[in-house]
């Protein structure tokens, strides 16, 4: 799959799920906390954009660039995604304003409580889960045989949108 097709596929899947668990995988002592985030958009360059709750400490004490993992999952969907990438805290007011469509006073209130983060996707693992349409007998058999197997039944499709 070409990189553009990969990004289009991932944009569609991320839009359908909407939210993810954000993990800052930096070794830094002071780092943005694990949070549930809602993606604002996935742009054509492979960046996932979202807001997180601003930490109590001064934001300048945090790393502005860090490794990230995003786990996209929604109950009822027959797939989930795990995105690995590089994240940045966005402090440029012009970039922030493209995502905040509010009067200036409201924008300032949002920025007092929230931080805009962008993540460049470098790897995305797409997992399809077992369909809910299988019979109860097949589900029972599968559950029973899983006890005797140590390997994971999920085989991901792996995408490298940054390449």
Image (cartoon, rainbow, N blue to C red):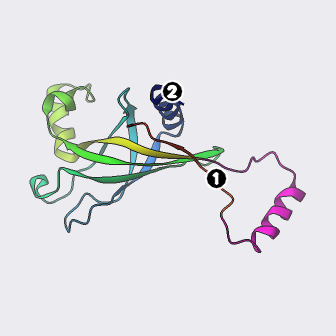
**What residue is at 86 percent from the left and 64 percent from the top?**
141
The percent position of residue 20, horizontal first and vertical second, equals: 45, 48
* Residue identified by numbered label 1: 155
Residue at 14% x, 32% y is 93
> Which residues lie in the magenta part?
127-151
- How would you rate the neighbour count of disc 2 (Cα within 10 Å): few for under 14, some for 14-19, many for 20 or more? few
Looking at the picture, does residue 32 appear above or below residue 119? below
Kindly report the distance in space between the C-alpha atoms of the residues bearing marks 1 and 2. Answer: 20 Å
As displayed, is residue 159 above or below residue 105? below
Say whether residue 137 is left or right of residue 144: right
Where residue 29 appears, x then y in whole percent?
Answer: 20, 69
Element at label 2: helix
Task: Locate residue 117, reporting x and y percent.
Answer: 27, 43
| Classed neighbour count for the residue bearing mark 1: other residues with Cα under 10 Å, few (<14), some (14–19), many (≥20) | few
Residue positioned 59% across, 49% down in the render: 156
Image quadrant occupied by the C terminus: top left
List the single residue furthest toward the bottom: 148
Marks 1,2: beta carbons within 8 A: no
- Is residue 148 in the magenta section? yes
Question: On the picture, is 9 further left or further right than 86?
Answer: right
Q: Earlier in the sequence, mark 1 or mark 2?
A: 2
Q: Secondary structure at mark 1?
A: loop
- The image's mark for residue 5 is 2
Is 95 one of the magenta-colored residues? no
Is 77 placed left or right of 103 in the picture?
right
What residue occupies the far right of the structure in this picture?
137
């Amino acid at each position: 799959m070409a990189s553009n097709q990969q990004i289009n596929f991932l944009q569609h899947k991320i839009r359908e799920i909407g939210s993810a668990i954000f993990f800052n995988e930096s070794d830094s002592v002071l780092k943005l906390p694990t949070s549930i985030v809602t993606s604002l958009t996935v742009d054509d360059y492979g960046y996932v954009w979202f807001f997180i709750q601003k930490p109590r400490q001064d934001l300048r004490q945090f790393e502005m660039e860090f490794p990230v993992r995003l786990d996209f999952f929604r109950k009822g969907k027959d797939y989930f995604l795990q995105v690995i990438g590089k994240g940045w805290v966005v402090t440029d007011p012009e970039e922030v304003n493209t995502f905040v469509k509010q009067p200036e006073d409201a924008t300032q209130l949002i920025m007092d409580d929230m931080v805009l983060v962008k993540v460049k996707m470098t790897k995305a693992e797409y997992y399809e889960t077992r369909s809910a349409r299988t019979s109860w007998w097949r589900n029972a058999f599968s559950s029973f045989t899983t006890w005797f197997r140590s390997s994971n039944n999920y085989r991901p499709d792996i995408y490298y949108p940054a390449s």
